[in-house]
Image (cartoon, rainbow, N blue to C red):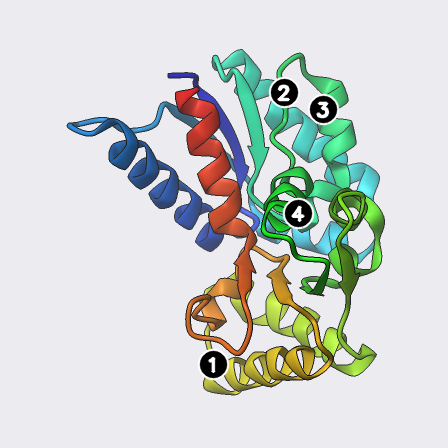
Amino acid sequence: MRKLGLIGGTSWHSTAMYYEQINKGVAKKLGGFASAPLVIESLNLADVAPLQLGGRWDEVAEIFTAAAKRLETSGAEGLIICSNTGHKVAAEVTAAVGIPLLHMGDVVGERLAADGVKRAGFLGTRFTVSEPFIRERIEGRGVALATPAPATAQEIDRIIFEELAKGEVTRNSQRRLKTCLTEMGQARQQAVVLACTELVLLVDPVANVLPVYDTTALHAKAAVEWITA
C-alpha cells in the first residue's frame, strides 16, 4: 500500500470522517486486519478560518504548503486536502512538493460524468460555489453546475462556518438544506453536489428527492483506490 498524507483540521469533524471512511474502505477491500497507512497534518481552524474569511489567501497557502512539506518529509507518497474550500490553494500545495495531490474536483467530476449527470446543484462555502478552483474541473467534464439563490447561498455559508465547522447540527439548518434540495429538484437539476465536507452532517445522501453526491465520501473512496493501487 502507498502512504497517503492528509491535510485536515478544517474542520476536524470532516477529517475524522475521512479517517474512518478510508480505513473502513481499506479493510473492506483487503480484509483481515488491514488499515490505511496515513499521515495527518491536522490544522487549527481557529487560525485558518479568519484568514479565509478575511481574504488573506496567501497566508492560507503558506499554512497548507508547510503542512504538505511536512507530510512529504514524513514519508507520504501522495496528498489529499480534506476540505473543498481548502482546494483554493491546491495549486500552491502541488507546486511546493514532489508528490501528487488527489484533487477533489477531479474525483467528483469523474464520478458525475460516469453517472451521466449533466446538470447538478452545487452547495458549499461562498468561496467554493463562486470561484473556479473546484467547479471548473467538474464543468470541464460536461456537467453544468447551478448555485442556489443568493440568500440561500449566504445562509448555507453561515451554517457551514458558524455551525457545522464547530460540529453543531440544528434542526432548523437541516430543514433549510432540505428545502434547498427540494428547490433544486423543482429546477430540474439531476443531482446535488455537497461541495463542503461537513454538509453531509445535515443530509442523508440516500433518502432525498434527487441523488446527492457527498464529496467527503467520494474523496475518501478515491483515496482508498489510490492507497491500494
Say whether disc 4 or disc 3 marks the residue closer to the N-terminus.
3
Say whether disc 2 or disc 1 marks the residue closer to the N-terminus.
2
Q: Quadrant of the N terminus?
A: top left
Label 2 or label 1, whichever lies nearer to me, is: 2
Towards the viewer: 66 or 135: 135
Instruction: For mark 2, give the secondary structure.
Output: loop
**x, y percentage for residue 160?**
61, 67
How far apart, in angstroms, are the residues tagged by discs 4 and 3? 25 Å
The residue depicted at 81 percent of the width and 46 percent of the height is: 136
Can you identify the residue that label 2 sits on? 100
**x, y percentage for residue 111?**
59, 46
How far apart, in angstroms, are the residues tagged by discs 1 and 4? 33 Å
Can you identify the residue that label 3 sits on? 94
Say whether disc 1 or disc 3 marks the residue closer to the N-terminus.
3
Can you identify the residue that label 1 sits on? 170
Label 4 or label 3, whichever lies nearer to me, is: 4
Few, some or many residues within 10 Å of mark 2 (<14, 14–19, 20+): some
Few, some or many residues within 10 Å of mark 3 (<14, 14–19, 20+): some
Q: Amino acid at mark 3?
A: Thr
Label 2 or label 4, whichever lies nearer to me, is: 4
* Label number found at residue 113: 4
How far apart, in angstroms, are the residues tagged by discs 2 and 1? 38 Å
Q: Is residue 41 above or below residue 118?
A: above
Instruction: For mark 3, give the secondary structure.
Output: helix
Label 2 or label 3, whichever lies nearer to me, is: 2
Instruction: Let me know if residue 56 appears in the view.
Output: no
Q: Amino acid at mark 1?
A: Thr
